[in-house]
Image: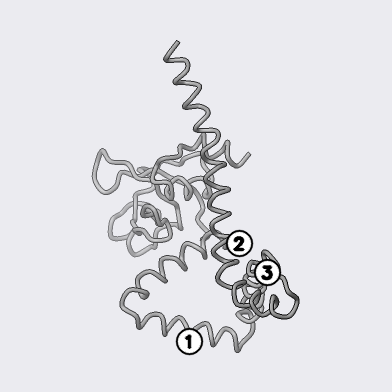
């Protein structure tokens, strides 16, 4: 009886907590963004209209992002973006944080998804230890000529940031192809193995 109650309680937690935490995070982000941008505008509006508009800060935030997107696609905006990136690179801490965050967001919102071909397993970094990887291309001829075997260029992602990793050349016959999409494999790497492929497929559905 106690085991059944415990089972139902845990099942309830696993059902409610993800939704509750997601809603809470959205609420906190809404309050944060609305508080930062909306505070100054609403003070001005309240002095004129006598009331403030909830959510105005969020609307301004979305408008700023949209305007930045338009600006960055034009020549002047691209030059300004390049200048800001160089300026950020001069700060000791930001020059390490910014590139990693940029790579993550570039992957999440990229339409090409890095151009990897297949998800594979390879014995790396030593025999008996298997790592998840992505076939990037066939091996280059000079390396194949030196080794005398057909090679594949394999990218092994790091955890939890799969946009950084290791490039290795692996003999084709030692590569094991997995029946998994690039997206599923990337999300598996980002979770640090906490989500298995079945759970990732279930989420996509």
Viewer-side residue, 124 vs 174: 124
At label 1, counting other C-alpha atoms closer than 10 Å, the crowd grade (few under 14, some 14-19, many 20 or more) is few
Q: Point out the tag, 1 or 2, that comes first from the N-terminus.
A: 1
Q: Is residue 117 left or right of residue 148?
A: right
Quarter the N terminus occupies: top left
Looking at the rendered structure, the secondary structure element under dot 2 is: loop
Circle number at residue 111: 2
Against 49, is 146 above or below?
above
Residue at image coords 42%, 71%: 98
Badge 1 element: helix
Quick one: SS at disc 3? Answer: helix
Q: Which mark is residue 56?
A: 3
In the image: residue 187, left or right of residue 174:
right
Q: How far from the left and from the top, in percent, is residue 56?
A: 67, 69
Residue 176 location in percent, x, y? 41, 41
Along the line of sight, which residue is nearer the eye, 163 or 138?
163
Residue 96 placement: quadrant: bottom left
Residue at (53% x, 49% y) in the render:
183
What is the quadrant of the C terminus in the image?
A: top right
In the current view of this chain or complex, which residue is farthest to the left? 126
- Residue designated by label 1: 83
Q: Residue 182, percent across and down? A: 52, 49
- Closer mark to the observer between disc 2 and disc 3: 3
| Marks 1 and 3 close (CB-CB < 8 Å) | no
User: What is the residue that sits farthest to the right in this orientation?
Assistant: 49
The tag earlier along the polypeptide, 1 or 3, is 3
Q: Few, some or many C-alpha atoms within 10 Å of disc 2 (few <14, some 14-19, many ≥20)? A: few
Task: Check if mark 1's residue and mark 2's residue have beta carbons within 8 Å.
Answer: no
């Amino acid at each position: 009886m106690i085991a059944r109650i415990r089972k139902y309680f845990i099942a309830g937690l696993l059902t409610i907590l993800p939704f509750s935490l997601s809603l809470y995070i959205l609420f906190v982000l809404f309050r944060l963004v609305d508080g930062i941008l909306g505070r100054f505008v609403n003070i001005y509006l309240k002095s004129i209209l006598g009331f403030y508009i909830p959510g105005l800060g969020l609307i301004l935030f979305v408008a700023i992002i949209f305007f930045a997107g338009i600006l960055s696609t034009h020549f002047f905006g691209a030059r300004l973006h390049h200048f800001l990136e160089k300026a950020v690179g001069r700060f000791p801490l930001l020059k390490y944080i910014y590139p990693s965050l940029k790579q993550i967001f570039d992957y999440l919102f990229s339409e090409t998804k890095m151009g990897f071909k297949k998800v594979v397993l390879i014995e790396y970094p030593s025999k008996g230890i298997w790592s998840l990887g992505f076939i990037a291309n066939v091996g280059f001829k000079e390396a194949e000529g030196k080794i005398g075997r057909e090679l594949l260029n394999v990218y092994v992602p790091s955890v939890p940031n799969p946009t950084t990793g290791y490039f290795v050349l692996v003999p084709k016959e030692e590569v094991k192809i997995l029946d998994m999409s690039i997206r599923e494999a990337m999300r598996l790497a980002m979770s640090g193995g906490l989500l298995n492929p079945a759970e990732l497929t279930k989420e996509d559905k």
